[in-house]
Amino acid sequence: MTNKAWSGVFEQATDRRVELFSESISFDHRLYAQDIRCSIAHAQMLAQVGLISADECRQIEQGLEAIRQEIEQGNFAFRTELEDIHMHVEKALIERTGDVGRKLHTARSRNDQVSTDLRVWVRDAIDLLDGRLLDLQKAFVGRCDADADVILPGYTHMQRAQPVLAPHYWLAYTEKLERDRGRLADCRKRVNVLSLGAAALAGTTLPIDRHDVAKRLDFADVARNSLDVSSDRDFAIEFAFALSLIAEHLSTWAEEWILWSTTEFNFIKLPQTFCTGSSIMPQKINPDVLELTRGKTARVIGNLTRLLVLVKGLPLAYNRDLQEDKEPLFDSFDTVRMCLELAAPLVAGTELKRDVIAARLDRGHLDATTLMEFLIKHGVPQRTGHEIVGKLVRTALERDCRLADLSQAEFTAAHPVLDSRVYDSLGAANAVAAFVSYGSTAPAEVAKQVAWWKQKLA
Ligand code: ARG
């Protein structure tokens, strides 16, 4: 009736519907490499402490390696009734090695096994994503020299605000991605703790050596409390959060570039290889990759919410609910990874329409704040300067002209310090050149930042 590892106490076979309902092999099969790696380390430790012989350990290792190959070559049969990847691998090992394979699960539970597998998987995922984030940073920094002299309108409230150098924009995203990398690195510290050896929840009466396993699996630490670690999914949630913030950053960038690619903005030309057309409107070249990057952020945030709600109110220690942690985690990782892998070539391959941008840089009085600061430099209180420039902007708006088009007489009438030198601070280029503060869009500051990033990312 039963071929299940846990069926000894059972008198009846599992309802087929329950098997379908409770299986996780359809998604946790992707933990096979981690599961095998952790099992080999576990077996080596068992041999080390004398719970199995060296020969048994060798048979287990060889058996597990053969199973890995079978899986990788697509020759491995996955069966719903075997529940999950752990059961599949163990069952296959027992089929190959008999009683030797039946020893592998010594001093181990699927509860600490799945947690360890997942930690190794998240650790690998973090390391991979760090490289993808770096690639995207390099794409942004890689644009900086070519775009060094391009001045863009900077926006607040989506209204033209102050002029900003294009590299300043690129480095703004580079900074966000750097924090994302920092968050992943920080999360990795809490991921990188061994749970194996917690067994079901309380540890084991057998003389295992958890620190030996930790070393074999490159874990920096061993979880101190078996009860805590068998219920702990903080590391998964933290990872899902870090992924959510990456997705948010990509979404901001995507939104901005979607706008910039419109006829209304017309700041950029996206590479056609990253756009798609319309089935009815022949002229359309749509920024679908950017839209989907923005759209997929929803599922990444949804996955984080799923995980948070999943663990809410779960009593210690392992509960089967926790099986639901993997799909959202896998999905968030796959999604963010794909977005990053598309973002890097998209950033590198997009053309900045310098002439169009330059031709409209006079719109929106981007130099108004600089003019106000000109007054402040000449002793005018900020509030007074603000009011004076506000009135000058009102005049310019009425006349539909630039501040630089106002006459000397108008400036002098507004305030006596606004002599002919005032014209040297007007216009986007003069305004940008006037910045001096640390971290500002001042050309010298931006150049310093570009140099710093180039060295950092080299
Ligand atoms: N497939 C399970 C999971 O993903 C593995 C642990 C099951 N443990 C148990 N005692 N049923 O969480």
Image (cartoon, rainbow, N blue to C red):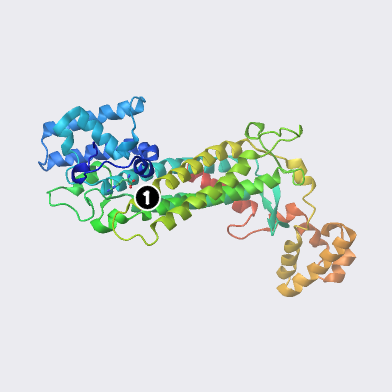
Position of residue 189 relative to residue 355, above or below, is below
Residue in front for this viewpoint, 157 or 119: 119
Does the numbered disc 1 mark a residue whose Cβ is under 8 Å from ligand 1? no
Which image quarter: residue 277?
top right
Q: Residue at x 76, y 74 (%)?
A: 384
Position of residue 163 relative to residue 19, above or below, is below
Position of residue 163 relative to residue 68, above or below, is below
Number of labels in the image equals: 1
Look at mark 1 in the image and give the residue it sits on.
188
Q: Residue at x 72, y 70 (%)?
A: 376
Instruction: Please indicate, yes or no, whether residue 303 appears anywhere in the rendered image.
Output: yes
Q: Quadrant of the N terminus?
A: top left
Residue 379: x, y in percent? 72, 73
The answer to whether 224 appears left or right of 450 in the picture is left
Residue 207: x, y in percent? 12, 49
Residue in front for this viewpoint, 290 or 457: 290
The answer to whether 259 appears left or right of 82 in the picture is right
Q: Identify which amino acid the numbered label 1 is placed on.
A: Arg
Instruction: Please indicate, yes or no, whether residue 167 appears anywhere in the rendered image.
Output: no
Q: Residue at x 21, y 41 (%)?
A: 42
User: Disc 1 on helix, strand or loop?
Assistant: helix
